[in-house]
Amino acid sequence: MDVLSAIQGRRSIRKYSDKLVEDEKLLGVLEAARLSPSARNLQEWKFIVVKDPEVKEKLVKAADQPFIGEAPIILVCCGENTSGIMKCGQPRYTIDVSIATAYMVLEAYEQGLGTCWLGSFDEDMVKKTLDISENVRVVAMTPLGYPLESPSQRPRKELKEIISYDKY
């Protein structure tokens, strides 16, 4: 599969099988994050693989989204809030972790797995649950598992609506 096919085929999955994710597939997803680019190649990120049912239940409460507990794994994507602001004004860690998470989502799709990018959660609850230090931010979470649904593609704007040349 090529990258554009993965981008076109990927969907946010909200129903998961209880089938366990094979270690080699999980490692492939995590390897995609490891290989992703980061500002100054600092790689100031950490990805927490949560499999423990009790810990997952606490994350379900922190996100108030019960479906994430159906998946055998929840990935918690964190960035160290120490590398500062890029010249363009964006915090490095948010961009770096977002790129890495996107790479993981695409590799998961390639492996036949489902994900659903979550940005709606109580960060303090997540940090307390996972013993994450104060200088680390939780940027995103995603369940990871075998999908029990195949949602249709949501509407996308046409290229002419989102692209301009030489000026806004």
Image: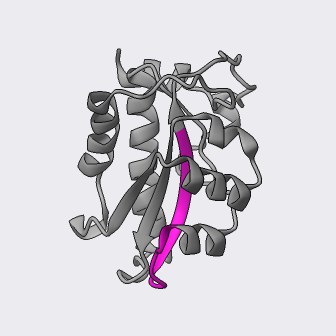
Placement of the N terminus among the 4 image quadrants: top left
Residue at 41% across, 57% down: 48
Q: Position of residue 18 (x, y in %)?
A: 56, 25
Of 12 and 96, which appears nearest the observer?
12
Say if 106 sits above or below 148 in the image: below
Q: Is residue 89 left or right of residue 58?
A: left
Left or right of residue 144, residue 68 in this image:
right
The image quadrant that residue 3 belongs to is top left
| Percent coordinates x, y for residue 2 in the rendering | 35, 19
- Between residue 88 and residue 21, name the one nearer to us: 21
- The image shows residue 91, relative to residue 77, as above or below, that is below
- Residue 167 placed where, x, y %? 58, 54
Q: Residue at x 44, y 27 (%)?
A: 20
Residue 47 occupies quadrant: bottom left
Which residue does the image show at 63% across and 50% down from the upper left? 118
- Residue 17 spot, x, y in % from top left: 58, 22
Q: Residue 59 lies in magenta, yes or no?
A: no
* Highlighted magenta segment, given as a residue range: 130-143
Depth order, front residue of 105/124: 124
Q: Is residue 141 magenta?
A: yes
Query: In the rendered view of the protein, which quadrant contains the C terminus?
Result: bottom right
Colour approach in the figure: one colour
At x 46%, y 57%, the residue is: 77
Q: Is residue 156 left or right of residue 90?
A: right
